[in-house]
Image: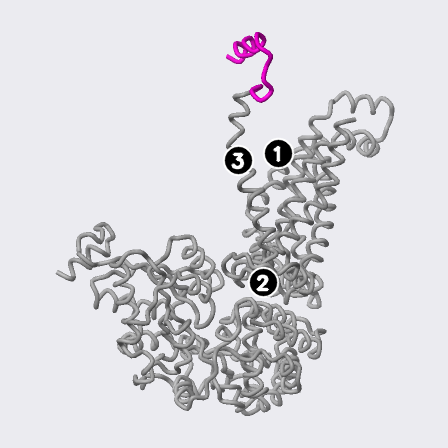
Amino acid sequence: MSRARSGGARARPPIRMFRNFSSKLAAIPMVLVGLGVFVGGTIWTIVHSFTDSRLLPRLRWVGFDQYERLWNTRRWLVSIENLAVYGIVSLVLTMCLGFLLAALLDRKIRYEDTFRTIFLYPFALSFIVTGLVWQWILNPEFGIQSIVRGLGFSGFNFDPLYNPDLVIIGLLIAGLWQGTGLIMVIMLAGLRGIDEDIWKATRVDGIPVWKTYVIVIIPMMKPVFVTALVLVTSGIVKLYDLVVAMTSGGPGIASEVPAKYVYDTLFTRQNLGQGFAASTMMLVTVAIILIPWAYMQFREKRQ
Amino acid sequence: MKKTLALLASTSLISVGSAAFAVDLEVTHWWTSGGEAAAVAEFARLFNENTEHTWVDGAIAGSGGTARPIMIGRITGGDPMGATQFNHGRQAEELVEAGLMLDLTDLAEAEGWRDFVNPTSLLDSCTLDGRIYCVPINIHSWQWLWLSHKAYEDAGVPVPTNWDEFVAAAPALEEAGKIPLAMGGQPWQSTGAFGVMSIALAGREAWEAVHIDHNAEVAAGPEYARVFEAAAQARSFAARSNVQDWNQATNLVITGQAGGQIMGDWAQGEFQVAGLVAGEDYSCLPGLGVNEIISTGGDAFYFPKVNNPEVEAAQLELASLMISQEAQVAFNLKKGSLPVRGDIDLTAANECMQKGLEILATGAILPDLNQTFSPDTGGQIDDLMVEFWNDPNFSAEEAQRLYAEIIASAD
């Protein structure tokens, strides 16, 4: 049918708008949803972040007051710091561990399927379940600490969730345990996509295996790394449920994260203006990371 | 006839059309623990027995913080329930201002609510521009120090009768391996305990200046400095209490592992369930034994507006029933809270509840934090308190400075 259409189009000069008409028609609902829900919702949120809306949205302007208050709020500053620490450490560690595990599995080992299943399994659990499980494991009364003490090391102390300085490590352990498997599988798929001949060629040239990985394989896997990076980063920015399940932001406010601040201000504290200001700041943060990356991608394509 | 109808309605198969004015009224609330559910069941029973309408229970699990966003979402989203719980105070203020709640003024005037509701401040909380929009149903007070007799016997010191004795006895408890003060890690518990200490130690005038006039100078002044110092001291007493929920902390007191806990009168239910007797196994000190004043928080019911005269009639009937003498006695004995009517007799209440009733009768009462601060200001204080109580390096002076800043911008 499309052939017949293009045949007809040859007779008359094609009108640009109607080129690929059916695919454009099919895209209309998606475009409308995109514009209406995402762009419209974003603009609505940003506009209301300059008002003093409380429980219900209303347009009474207060300028940058909400932002001023936000950046003077200790809890928000702690949240940003936590997200930065969690984000950087978990980004680096998931990528490294994910690749390492994938490379090890790719060495044609025995029981590969079994190991792959074991590593991927935590990903099948939600963050809430993951958080609860690790909350119990890290609980000093029932978990690791009491087991090690039971073995005779009575001085052993390991209670990250009750120590404001260490609580972020507790979150990281749970986050890595849950997320590394997925990255490993993606990396493994990338490694399987590498032509066997490349391995043969490097072997003929006598290049050591680790060097082959670093200078040949990893550059070849760039698209896989980008995919993994996007998945991990988006997971970090929306970090919320893990914190709620493991610590509810405690001890004190030591493990608060921005998404939790937004939720609490919007819904339990009935301060829409403040919540919108915080969510706008989250959007700006994401944009700051995303725009240079998009720009780089775009420039590469043009070259 | 009535029984058959009730039976049919309870199976939910026959719609309301079968009886001319019978309505299925959905009532949402967050009472899900054992004692709470038993108390609200009294309302449901009385409503189903005394009217031809049916109570449809809409309990939302997970405490008020979880339930309120759901309730507000339903009301503002155009799917209102028949009636809903909120705490006394300003949680529903904007919903009332937006005209989403049913005006109960005519009913209240016809039944003379203002004559028997005690304290009348409860009704004031329901009032906006002279119109009444909610039914107060109970009074809960925060200002109690619960003490374990066993813990003090084990440590070999007498049970304290006020806060200063409690502080003096703390080292002896520490030596005996007990936790002097049990404290859960949730933010509202930190704020609550601080509120109790401020009424008891700063005194009534300073408290009123800060909470009613929002006077930041008083909040930064010497009366409050004393409160913050005492709070820092209490923080060190509670350092080893590694629990989260309030009832786990209460359990530390019940089992004698901890000396005391600052908690509202709902803690009493836990002592009762554990079979402990007030005055023998545990004592309660209202106002920390220093200033015997209680705050009058609690719960109220609001009735969202629906464009249906039949439902509206049922809502008014429920409102009238909730504040009736019969329902007040039945509900509050199960709930462990004090009734909102000054004209009923509660001889069945135990020693601690009687103390509360006596204080209520003398009029030594103050409004609850929910009545004096908006949820936003309350939330800011929560954040400050939970950080202060959990970080031993957070100095009392610094906390007081930040507290005064919040009060300066409070609403």
Label 3 or label 1, whichever lies nearer to me, is 3
Which chain letter goes with mark 2?
A
Residue type (three-letter) at the residue carrying disc 3: Leu
Mark 2 vs 1: CB contact within 8 A: no
Magenta: main secondary structure equals helix
Q: Is residue B283 left or right of residue A296?
A: left
Which chain letter goes with mark 1?
A
Asked if A189 appears above or below A57 in the picture, the reply is above
Any part of residue B406 in sight: yes
Mark 2 vs 3: CB contact within 8 A: no
Tell me which residue sits at (65%, 34%) in the image. Answer: A112
Q: Position of residue B382 (x, y in %)?
A: 58, 70
Residue type (three-letter) at the residue carrying disc 1: Asp
Highlighted magenta segment, given as a residue range:
A1-20
Who comes first in sequence, dot 2 or dot 1? 1
Which chain letter goes with mark 3?
A
Q: Position of residue B172 (x, y in %)?
A: 62, 87
Mark 3 vs 1: CB contact within 8 A: no
Q: Which residue is mark 2?
A: A142
Residue type (three-letter) at the residue carrying disc 2: Phe
Asked if B335 appears above or below B74 in the picture, the reply is below
Asked if A236 appears above or below B364 in the picture, the reply is above
Magenta-drawn stretch contains B285: no
Q: Secondary structure at mark 1?
A: helix
